[in-house]
Amino acid sequence: MKKLVLSVVVLAVAVFSAKADKTADVTGTAQLLEQIAVSTTLPSGNAGLTGSVSGGALNFGIIGISGAVSKVIVTPTGARSGDGGNPGLSNNSVTPTAAGFAITGGSGMSYTVTYPSSFELNGDNAKKLTVNTLTITGNSTTRSITAGKDAFAIGGTLNIPADASAGNYNGIMTVTVAYN
Amino acid sequence: MFRKLLLSICAASAVFQVMAEVPASIATAPARIQIIGPLAVTKVADMDFGLISITSGTSSLVLPPAPGRQSLSITGDAVSLASSNPTAAKFSVTGQGNANFSINVPSSVTLSDIDGHGGGDILVYISCDQPGAAPSFTSTLVDGIKEFYLGGTLVIGANQTPSRYSGSVSVNVDYN
């Protein structure tokens, strides 16, 4: 809050000086924007999202070892499929989910979502798995905010090597949003 | 000149402040998967109807899906020889303990004359010892293993040619 006040003062000086020199005004509208914020706490009922979406958790569920190179794909609606080899898909007690994110910010503003091209899951067996080919709701990382809010979900592809070991694998996906 | 310079400095700080006030926001999300042991199905024993003597009539012979030597229930005039050893097929499914799985079993299999005597195909309708099996079923790998038996109903047509008949049943398992 203090920072906001300071910047307004500085801008006012700039505008004043600009006028004195009859050059174009510096627009100060950006100052009136509320900060864009991304959260993994989804609105009730996951409003704006469809399918199996969890607040911030990209969950590939449970699979059985197949002994073959394979992929497990979770779409932004949380639909899971296997590709290449037989990942031995198993839904046993765990529902796969896409990672959902809620945005708050200035109405009508366009923003860009940035997520990693790949990241790793670390197993409790010291093995690693790679997630890549992340996908986002609407297939576009440029989105807009309506009525101060937006929501999107991210899915991805988990790559299973032929020598995959049984275990629990966890990782962190970092998602950044910024006004365009 | 001096004034102009001052102006540009002021403008520059204004721009800087605008950017600083519209930062990016970052969220981190966990991602996870659990990989469990492989699921496999193994044939432990073949299905065998044994030796059957026939006359010219039609018969159906039921092999129960159960362990050990079975007695065939016969409709018609076929006879299961006492010296033969009818047995149900036995399969073993192994995988992650307590995981649920489903198994696909064909409802019938065709047996063909493997001795080239010109006998027509014989149909076997497959049965399974699991509750509700049709004959495909879903079950749980208690202690990581599940065994099951397949039996069947063999249908012998009129004037079936005496010979040896054989066929293959493929079953598929998947975690649910």
Image (spheres, coloured by chain):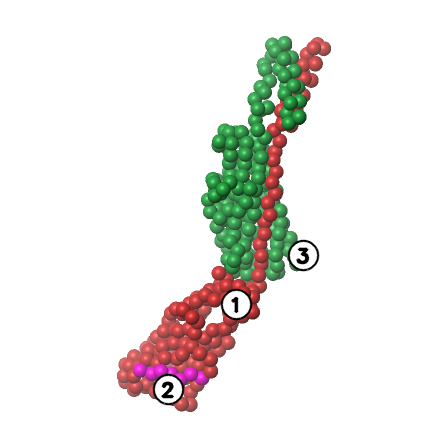
Q: Chain of mark 3?
A: A
Residue A85 in view, yes or no:
no
Write down which chain is painted green: A
Residue at 51% x, 36% y is: A150
- Per the rendering, the colour in which chain B appears is red
Q: Secondary structure at mark 3?
A: loop
**In the current view of this chain or complex, which residue is farthest to the right?**
B2
Task: Give the amino acid type for the residue marked by disc 1 in the picture.
Answer: Leu
Q: Can you give x and y, in whole percent of width and height, for residue B128 in the image?
A: 42, 73
Residue at 29% from the left image edge and 79% from the top image edge:
B157
Residue at 51%, 40% (x, y): give it: A43
Identify the magenta region: B69-75
Residue on which the image places disc 3: A126
Residue A167 picture location, percent across and down: 61, 59
Q: Return the mark for residue A19.
A: none
Which residue lies under the disc numbered 1? B141
